[in-house]
Amino acid sequence: MLVVLRALEREDLITLHKWQNDEEIMRLARSFPDHVISKEALEIEFARELKGDDTGRRAYIIEEKSSNKPIGWATIRIHQFQRRVTTADVGLALGETTAWGKGYGTETANLLLDEVFRQLNLHRAEWWTYAENNVSVQLAKKLGFKEEARLRDAVFFDNRYHDLVVLGLLRQEFESIRTAPETSRDKTVSYLQSP
Ligand SMILES: CC(C)(COP(=O)(O)OP(=O)(O)OC[C@H]1O[C@@H](n2cnc3c(N)ncnc32)[C@H](O)[C@@H]1OP(=O)(O)O)[C@@H](O)C(=O)NCCC(=O)NCCS
């Protein structure tokens, strides 16, 4: 185990504030390089989660297991507009760039998918990113997501339009990857660990 997902605490808002005002992180995480947010606005955004209300969104802090240090944040957003709830968006960002490329993103995403399919019993996971975010697209595909849609010129930043890519993973696809022999897939973790 490389990472632990734990609940967001009020003290984390300071670190989240740093990450969510970082141009590079927010370009990649939200297609929004000029994103700026005050501590107070962040506190308002996460007020209900901090109180433990069920908002349909689960917000996690990703901690590096070896150091117990926060390295990023992750969310699961359950689609609320469906007649029958079937789908959740998964999102993650490693705010500490020194943590990139070490397998932390893969393990975090697997933990989120475990929660979506094996705890929440949902049918579909969605992954949204802009088309040039190669690492994000490659990670999603490595996990078994398939590109399902490309929304042309759907976001504007850095003085031009960019396509958005929507990738989807069905529960049976996730399970068939998970139950495949170890040699034919990447080694994955299979549970959401508490701190
Ligand atoms: C995207 C992100 C979560 C990936 O996490 P990570 O820990 O760096 O990625 P991993 O080390 O687990 O690698 C996962 C896969 O991504 C791809 N990848 C990683 N680094 C890459 C690079 N420099 N170039 C191309 N692909 C890369 C590979 O497919 C890799 O799998 P492999 O090592 O088996 O080939 C992380 O880079 C990040 O937080 N980026 C900023 C925010 C963001 O883009 N979030 C996603 C928005 S939807």
Image (tube, rainbow, N blue to C red):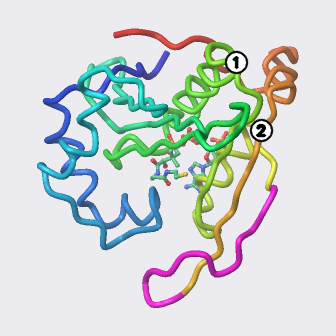
Query: From the viewer's perspective, is residue 18 above or below residue 118?
Result: below
Q: Position of residue 89 (x, y in %)?
A: 60, 42
Judged from the image, the secondary structure of the residue bearing numbered disc 1 is: loop
| Residue located beneath label 1 in the image | 121
Left/right placement of residue 46 relative to residue 135 reads left
Whether tag 2 and tag 1 are in contact, CB under 8 A, the answer is no
Rounded to the nearest angstrom, the CA distance separating label 2 from label 1 is: 14 Å
Instruction: Name, please, the residue furthest toward the bottom.
Output: 159
Q: Nearer the viewer, residue 122 or 99?
A: 122
**Dot 2 or dot 1, earlier in sequence:** 1
Judged from the image, the secondary structure of the residue bearing numbered disc 2 is: strand
Left/right placement of residue 191 relative to residue 21 reads right
Q: Nearer the viewer, residue 91 or 185?
A: 91
Q: Which mark is residue 169?
A: 2
Q: Position of residue 127 (x, y in %)?
A: 64, 48
The residues colored magenta run: 148-160
When asked about the image quadrant of residue 150, the answer is bottom right
Left/right placement of residue 106 relative to residue 3 reads right
Q: Amino acid at mark 2?
A: Leu
Q: Residue at x 46, y 37 (%)?
A: 75
When asked about the image quadrant of residue 100, the answer is top left
Query: From the viewer's perspective, is residue 138 above or below residue 23?
Result: above
